Image (spheres, rainbow, N blue to C red):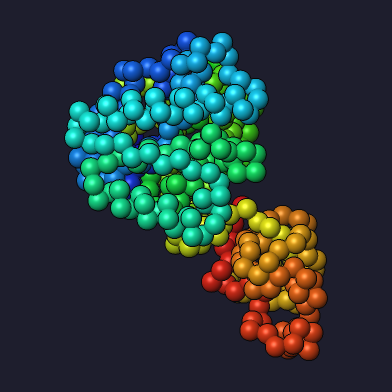
Amino acid sequence: MTDSLKDIRQTVVDRARTIVVKVGTNVLSREDDTLDEARFDALAEQMHLIRESGRQVVLVSSGAIGAGIGLLGLERRPDDLPHLQAAAAVGQAHLIRRYDDCLNKFGLRAAQLLLTANDFRHRGRYLNVRNTLRTLFEYRTIPIINENDTVSVKEIQFGDNDRLAALVANLLEDPLLVILSVIDGLYDGDPALPTSQVIPLVDRWDETIKSLALPTRSRRGTGGMQSKLDAARMVTAVGESVIIANGGQSGVLGHILRGENVGTLFLGQGEHLPAWKRWIGYSVAPRGQLRLDEGACRAISQRRKSLLPIGVISVEGEFHKGELLMLVDPQGREIARGLSNFNSQDTRRIAGRRSDELESILGQVHYEEIIHVDNLVLLSS
């Protein structure tokens, strides 16, 4: 590894106040779907080392369903939701107990947080999650987060724990997200080919990077390289960095802390956003869409202005005042997201109109802009 790359990696680690570690089901499980006890011991020791370095650590852990499959003696992962939830209910208790037993050797306790997507969509619940984590940091605890698979249905699922880990990283200050999988990092070709090599550093996103994610998923897990790249994009878009590495490598987190050439480092790309704007841009699902003309697009993206009614071409969806909207250019490409000052009915009435016309259309109004710049987030292309 060149000195410059080592310096980059060490700078990224030194800047991080919290290491968010995501560990996948395949990292934690043997081939027979039982938990790999030695892997838990190794993770606990490495998380202890992170704490000893003066940083906090949060673990986003898959494995509940996988553990339940083994404990229930199932021959394969169930296909239907009730049996998946039953496996999660059995497996989660075993999973957290195993973590707690391992962490106790280092004077640490496991703190369990089971979340659904609604915990991030609703501002109050989102803040409660963040406040709980901050309070747990005051004690000798390791927050261990998983999706609440026992109650999650399609409408409130994250999709995979890679996305959950990205959301957790984005609600914390100065995080480094480390995604541990059974692959050494992002390869420049098919990982099965001997000519393919791990890319040590991704300092910008383009179509080439996206094309390197093969459309595959692991046998036990729900994600693949595409979901890991999506998670990395969410975090780097707000100015933070991500490392994808092999969780089966001995002492992998220690190697990362020392700035060594482990896995693929994705450098933060976008403007460093405060927590409020991270929530707007990357934690909430939009409830509607506004198509803008070219002038409005330039005002928002180049001059960082608020969105005025005159720049809106069309309105899609039904939404209330204060809900999140997607902003697209005339070609339908998403450029920003923001919180609306008007409901969908009133937005349709004032779309394309001048600000001085609003009172004659709606009566007394408190805003002249549909979305104020303080509640608007530009999305990285």
All told, the count of numbered labels is 0
- Check the image and report above or below for 252 versus 347: above
- Check the image and report above or below for 74 versus 334: above
Give the image location of residue 148, x and y in percent: 50, 38
Give the image location of residue 55, x and y in percent: 26, 45
Which residue occupies 75% across, 72% down? 347
Q: Quadrant of the N terminus?
A: top left
- Check the image and report above or below for 190 versus 74: below
Which residue occupies 54% across, 26% down? 86
Q: Quadrant of residue 256?
A: top left
Give the image location of residue 350, x and y in percent: 78, 77
Left or right of residue 261, residue 356 in this image: right
Give the image location of residue 310, x and y in percent: 75, 77
Q: Is residue 1 visible?
A: no
Which residue occupies 46% across, 21% down? 67
- Check the image and report above or below for 219 versus 128: above
Q: Is residue 80 visible?
A: yes
Left or right of residue 337, residue 36 in this image: left
Left or right of residue 363, residue 122 in this image: left
Which residue occupies 75% across, 62% down? 318
Q: Nearer the viewer, residue 6 or 368?
A: 368
